[in-house]
Image (cartoon, rainbow, N blue to C red):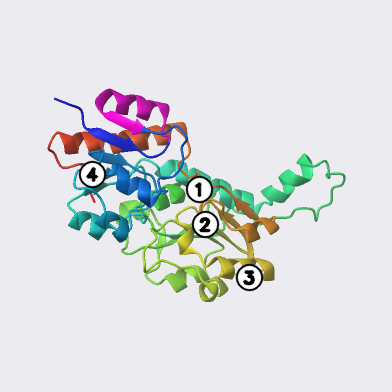
Amino acid sequence: MPKPVIWITRTLSDATLARARRDYEVIWDPADTPGSADDIIAMSAKVDGMIPCHSEHFSADVVAQLDRRLKIVANHSVGVDHCDLPALRAKGITVTNTPGVLSDATAELAMMLMLGAARHAVEGDRTVRSGAWDFWSPAFLVGKQVTGARLGIVGMGGVGRAFARKARGFDMEIHYHNRSRLSPKDEADAIYHDNLDDLLEVSDFLSLHCPATPDTTGLLNAKRLAQMPKGCVVVNTARGALVDEDALLAAIKSGHVGAAGLDCFVTEPGGNPAFAQHENIMMMPHAGSGTVTTRNAMGFKALDNLDAFFRGDQPPDQL
């Protein structure tokens, strides 16, 4: 019996590629460039399944042109805002994601960004690296202390809860807003706010961990930033669409927001060049899940979903 043919759109981990080649006929381009709409449409007539990343966009227009041969899109991501799920389902295409395996890696990066933004890591690194460190003063690079501060978390899914666990190591007071209140076990003495505005008012630090949806696009806008304490620190390792970037820049310039740590942007790749003018904004290129352990786990989860589908079972992470 011939093996199913799959398209892997980007360069996944060596272990993932090796396993995929063992079990499937794999189409993969080592040039590692994002798949365009035309690529996706053309490839749909050649493969039975795809493993795309968030860099490939399955809009309703693209989905309408997909060949009937394509039966499953096994995303190498947790977020699926790049997919028009109703359109894919209407086309009879199964869609899966990779939940539960990247929470710790993303939470680690959020912690790094929070600490780095609060303690002038960008400016400090540049000062030493450039050879400009030729003085010291008690007033030099005085930052915002994390230990004991109030942390607001928007979205208490897997990543949000992992971040809360790590923040407790700094004795932070955890506050959160979520679509629904967590169980007492998962809440672990965090303080629930059913209203986002109430959360913002007590957030010395704010970390975003919710998905990008029509309801959350532009969630952190000028009005909401103004509700936060002066000198607050904003961290976003979720999706760039959650933040009104012009509003955040204005709040940084005014000093109302003291610093920011960003791993995602409205425009990706590339980010927002205006942010680069401010050394109190620490940035990473959407690398939250970027550890060997996590990228292997994500790839294996995508393959687990494909394996289940092609043997006639429901994939464990079907959406």
Q: Which residue is mark 2?
A: 265
Which element type, helix, strand or loop, lies under badge 3?
helix
Q: Residue at x 17, y 26 (%)?
A: 2
Q: Nearer the viewer, mark 4 or mark 3?
A: 4
Q: Which residue is mark 4?
A: 72
Q: Which residue is mark 1?
A: 286
Label of residue 271 in the image: none
Which element type, helix, strand or loop, lies under badge 1?
loop
Q: Which residue is mark 3?
A: 250
Which element type, helix, strand or loop, lies under badge 2?
loop
Q: How far is the residue under mark 4 from the one under mark 2? A: 28 Å
Of the two numbered discs 4 and 3 on the same chain, state the one appearing first in sequence: 4
Q: Nearer the viewer, mark 4 or mark 1?
A: 4
Label 2 CA crowd tier, 10 Å (few <14, some 14–19, many 20+): many
Left or right of residue 65: residue 245: right
Q: As shown in the figure, which amino acid type bears the numbered disc 1?
A: His
Label 1 near label 4: C-beta < 8 Å?
no
Q: How many marks?
A: 4
Q: Nearer the viewer, mark 4 or mark 2?
A: 4
Label 1 near label 2: C-beta < 8 Å?
yes
